[in-house]
Amino acid sequence: MLRAAIDLGTNSCLLTIADVENSAILQVHEDTMRIVRLGQDIDRTGELHPDAQARTLQALHEYKDICTKHGIHAQDVAICATSAMRDASNSADFVAQVQQETGLHIQVISGEEEARITWNGALTQLKLPEGATPCLLDIGGGSTELVWNQGQERWSMQMGSVRATERYVHDDPPTPQMLQAIRKDLSDQLQQLPQIPAPAPLIAVAGTATTLLAIVHQVEPYDSSKIHGKPFQRAELLHLIELFGSMTSDQRRNLPGLHPKRADVITAGAQILLTVYEHLNLNEAIISDRGLRYGLLLEP
């Protein structure tokens, strides 16, 4: 069966269309991403910004057209929204506008539901050793989640690449003091984290993690086969943070593997990942470029 799923996040909007049979993804026909920055200014205002709504609506119109070309009707597209839409006081109005203009019905899902679905998506086509106790790290634009115990337990922190940038980064490039402020904020939240089994391995999912590894290996254009299931060393991450600190956003935009619209938030995202490495005393993560949309494809 041909199915389509859209992950509407705080920073990016992703569409995947694939053949799905017997709870398995057989062939991917479309896998595309738009940076819409839906979470613009939400941390400050608590509302979806008009410009962010316009960018997102344009992307959703494009996605509806792509689905139509594949013979998938708008009402059959699974589309879920996460942190930005959960936090925004006017998200219901935007859901109604999208429904009226495109026929797409957005479900704003809880953090617990997001964790469950993302877990199922992120682990697709990952070969883990027998007896593995994986822990999933999902760095989004507005929040960061840790998920463990086979997706049954979750810890969410109000700190993502966009939120951290808007809250703490006021110079370009960010000063060490600004990155330290991100580290302290997230570290304070991680101190409340329940005791979890030592991640074996830590699986990092979503745009920050995949982009950082793509920069390390200069993957341009993006190629999933060069990212999914590959290790990302703490030493490589430290090198990137040092590199980003020597460059302005305009300079970072030219880095192979970095989407230009992530250039302003990638340093904060990298600092979030490093802080999690430090807290869990890890030197490596396995990167997954699957996630919520892949989990949605597998939903009954």
Image: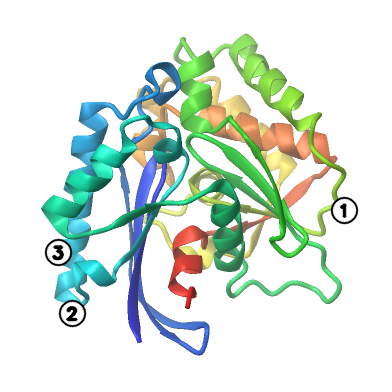
* SS for callout 3: helix
Q: In the rendered view, does 220 fall on the left or right side of 276? A: left
Q: Is residue 296 above or below residue 94?
A: below
**Neighbourhood count class around disc 1 (C-alpha, 10 Å): few under 14, some 14–19, many 20 upward:** few
Q: Secondary structure at mark 1?
A: loop
Numbered disc total: 3
Label 3 CA crowd tier, 10 Å (few <14, some 14–19, many 20+): some
* Residue 204 pos. (x, y %): 63, 52
Q: Which residue position is annotated with label 3? A: 65
- Name the residue tied to disc 1: 197
Q: Residue at x 55, y 21 (%)?
A: 245
Image quadrant containing the N terminus = bottom left
Residue 199 picture quarter: bottom right
Residue visible at 27% across and 58% down?
Answer: 105
Q: Earlier in the sequence, mark 1 or mark 2?
A: 2
Q: Amino acid at mark 1?
A: Pro
Report the amino acid beneath label 3: Asp
**Residue 71 x/y as whole percent:** 18, 79
Task: Residue 71: give its label.
Answer: 2
